[in-house]
Image (spheres, rainbow, N blue to C red):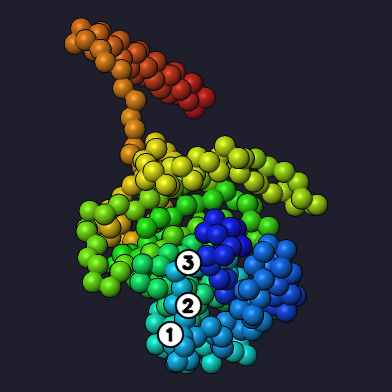
Amino acid sequence: MALAHQIGEQRCSIYSQDISQRSNKMLKLNLILNNLVRSLDNAIQGDTLTDPYHKNDAGNALRQFDFIVSNPPFKVDFPDTHAKVAAQTARFWAGVPNVPKEIDPKKPKMAIYTCFLQHVINSLKAGGKAAIVVPTGFITASSGVEGKVLKYIVENRLVYGCVSMPSNVFATTGTNVSVLFLRRPQDGESVDEAQKVCLMDASKLGEEYKEGNNQKKRLRPDEIDLVVSTFTKQESVDDFAVMVTYKDIMEKKCSLSAGQYFDIKIEHIDITPEQFAAEMQQAKSELQAMFEESNRLGNEIINNLNGVIG
């Protein structure tokens, strides 16, 4: 809805699908309150992974969208529908997470967000853009379904930005999260190897606050402006944001972690040859004194031992 307000309520339609009946009802209420009544019929309650509702006019493929925003569940166990999801190999081209041998309902283990990532990518129109919340661990994944999806979005030039957020900044999870920005190239569009991708580490921003018994974090208004401004202007800022090429990313094994690309700065002081010689002489003198003291202590220990033996 925030995105719809930016575009203009009369210039767009919202489509959604949520497995939770309660969440879907809440969304419909908010659509009414936010002057988006014409999108009411597009808010569907159902399982997006097993039965995606929004299809093209022929009903034989997923509907393609100009903009997609998603905050999917990260880990849940879905053994009852796993086989049905896994059977859709064309749709879930990177695979689906394996069912753990021992399923503990209190400790969900299946990284279901990887399925939603693939669904979002499949639903992007040529030239369309998406923003999706992922666990920060995903942006450096090197194996499994996560690694395959990460490699795919880099090799196919789909990712154009990634912002790592502070911990505990989202209400529904304490997991460290990042926001991934995707764009599907236009048909026939060639992407230059030198094209830049904006990687940002905003994890050190934010102020702490209490929400019930939970310690949370939120970005201050000026910090939000900093993130948005830096991303929009595609700027590099020391220890905060860096612009890198796809070639750079490939050389780092597809990592989208900004910290891996920051320049390592070594502080130095300019001194004259005479000052350098004087400091070296002082260091030699101090080192010689330490050697002499070490020898003295060694001899003293030996003499004391000889005295005890005698």
Q: Is residue 299 above or below residue 100?
A: above
Q: Are the residues at dot 1 and dot 2 in contact (C-beta closer than 8 Å)? A: yes
Relative side of 292 to 54, left or right: left
Q: Secondary structure at mark 2?
A: helix
Q: Nearer the viewer, residue 66 or 83?
A: 66
Q: Secondary structure at mark 3?
A: strand
Crowding around mark 2 (Cα neighbors within 10 Å: few <14, some 14 to 19, many 20+) is: some
Q: Is residue 194 visible?
A: yes
Residue under numbered circle 2 = 119
Q: Earlier in the sequence, mark 1 or mark 2?
A: 1
Q: Position of residue 60 (x, y in %)?
A: 44, 92
Q: Position of residue 220 (x, y in %)?
A: 62, 40
N-term mark: 1 or 3: 3
Which residue does the image show at 71% across and 68% down from the upper left?
32
User: For mark 1, what is the residue?
Assistant: 91
Q: Looking at the image, is mark 2 or mark 3 earlier in the sequence?
A: 3
Count of labels in the image: 3
Label 1 vs label 3: CA separation? 19 Å
**Mark 3 Cα-neighbour bin, 10 Å: few <14, some 14–19, many ≥20:** some
Percent position of residue 137, x then y:
49, 61
Disc 2/disc 3 C-alpha distance (Å): 13 Å
Question: In the image, what residue occupies the spot 53% across and 92% down?
Answer: 84
Q: Is residue 176 above or below residue 236?
A: below
**Residue sitting at the far right:** 212
The kind of residue on which mark 1 rests is Arg
Residue that label 3 marks: 67
Looking at the picture, how far across and down is residue 132, in whole percent? 51, 64
Nearest the viewer among 309 and 160 is: 160
In what quadrant of the picture does the N terminus appear? bottom right
Work out whether residue 145 can be spotted.
Answer: no
